[in-house]
Image (tube, helix red, strand yellow):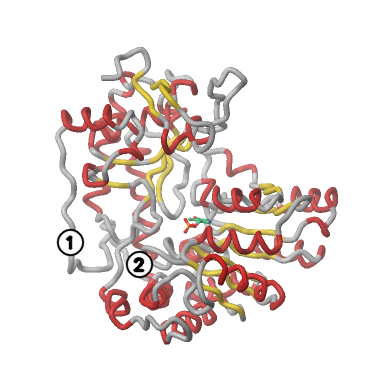
Amino acid sequence: MDWKWKTIIEPFKIKSVEPLGFTTREERLKILNAAHYNLFNIRAEKVLIDLLTDSGTGAMSAAQWGGIMIGDESYAGARSYYTFEREVKGLTGFAEIIPVHQGRAAEKILFGVIGGRGKYIISNSHFDTTRANVEFSGAQAVDFPVKEALDFDKPAPFKGNADITAMEKFINEKGAKNIPLCVMTVTNNSLGGQPVSMENLKAAQNLCRKHGIPLFLDCARFAENAYFIKLREKGYAQCPVREIAQEMFELADGAWMSSKKDALVNIGGFLAMNNRDWSAKARQMLILTEGFNTYGGLAGRDLEAIAIGLREVLDENYLQYRIRSAQYLGEGLLKRGVPIINPPGGHGVYVNARKFLPHLKPQRFPAQSLACALYLEGGIRGVEIGTLMFGRRDAKNNFLAAPMELVRLAMPRRVYTQSHIDYVIEVLGALAKKKKTIKGLEVVEAPKVLAHFTAKLKPAGGRSA
Ligand SMILES: *Cc1c(COP(=O)(O)O)cnc(C)c1O
């Protein structure tokens, strides 16, 4: 790539469009009140720019839509399955390829096979659904992020890395026989979508080899991670991203993927590995809960679209646009005095609401308050990662402060253009100028588990109109 211009040009032209949901401020105030200041309760058509998630929200290409038309819907042995299998094998090098309807289905099946009481799964950081599925099996999920991951202001190239020394100490304490798996999440979704270096993956492999522990990748954003390695790690600048990705997979014994991210489709996933004993058990579970081996909870056309997406995502023009867009949003926000996790990760920007709104204590939900203010100001929807989402409460049911207060602005793939991002920067910039007027929220009603999805809130000290 020799793009020397400042302008990010989207590496596609648009053939099919959808209208955006314009609303007035007055309408949005009504909508917010009716939604009880919970953005999950807002109809998507009332959102102008939807940055709630990058999962399953991407735009497929004309080639993928073409694949949808030629999908083979045969129950067993569909041609589309073999197209999919060939593509996933070619990319990952693993022998056993199991399709699933999305990432968490792969997790449920895998930890059903290898999890259980008394066991520990170790990781740079488990994603929420991974942790939930590990714990559902009876095992414990233990994270080993590097220290720089938690210093939001200080840039570092690979904040997604695992602390290998701490991992080894843990293995020695608990015994390798009680640790059936080490998972490296690439990129590290729970900690800002930050990349993991090849060096760190190699160190994880060495550690796992030494102790006889299988290493898997949770590879939802493998292409974004590989591109960061090309940009930031010594020795990879001239290496095609596909080869970097293949080198990442070569270090592992297996992987699972939520295809709703870097396979550029709206649904799908896979579980892949070399261990034939595990894969045989996984396929029994697959048939029980997902479907037959050659479709696993998906339609044949979905398999076709995944196969095409896995190739398109490694196009370096696409990846340059993708990573540059998140950086551009991050730079714009920093320039306007909006603190973020710096540098931005691959799939979006995380605003540091604790730092942005120091006048709000955690029990006033600064990140949720900012997310609501952002919707009210400009119809933009992000998601709170803070005291409400963590949801821990004391004996009197008062919320306990979370370790962080973030608003994640996740970027759907190939959906928004630079002008949409300029608009997001402008709106947050306007909020920065009057941030002292942003009021906190209080909870009216919140269930015990996963409170953030259904909690009802209102402006603190105000009326709940
Ligand atoms: C999204 C995601 C999952 C879960 O996948 P779903 O398709 O949402 O079920 C697992 N791990 C990571 C890192 C993810 O980003």
Looking at the rendered structure, the kind of residue marked 2 is: Tyr
Residue 175 image point, x, y percent: 85, 54
- What element does badge 1 sit on? loop
> 187 left or right of 142?
left
Residue 327 image point, x, y percent: 38, 51
Of residues 155 and 377, which is closer to you in this image?
377
Give yes or no for contact between labels 2 and 1 (Cβ–Cβ under 8 Å): no
Label 2 to label 1: alpha-carbon separation: 19 Å
Compared with 33, 151 (above or below) is below
Residue 42 image point, x, y percent: 29, 39
Mark 1: give few (<14), some (14-19) or many (20+) Cα within 10 Å. Answer: few
> 376 left or right of 257?
left
Q: Mark 2 vs mark 1: which is more N-terminal? A: 1
Mark 2: give few (<14), some (14-19) or many (20+) Cα within 10 Å. Answer: some
**Residue shown at 41% from the left, 24% from the top:** 357
**Looking at mark 2, is its residue's CB closer than 8 Å to ligand 1?**
no
Furthest-top residue in view? 461
Which residue is label 1 attached to? Answer: 17
Compared with 25, 280 (above or below) is below
Furthest-front residue in view? 288
Q: Write down the quadrant of residue 3 in the picture.
A: bottom left
- What element does badge 2 sit on? helix
Q: Which mark is residue 406?
A: none
Q: Nearer the viewer, mark 2 or mark 1?
A: 1
Looking at the rendered structure, the kind of residue marked 1 is: Val
The N terminus, quarter of image? bottom left
Compared with 45, 272 (above or below) is below
The C terminus, quarter of image? top left
Which residue is label 2 attached to? Answer: 318
**Residue shown at 54% from the left, 20% from the top:** 398
Residue 68 image point, x, y percent: 31, 76
Compared with 364, 153 (above or below) is below
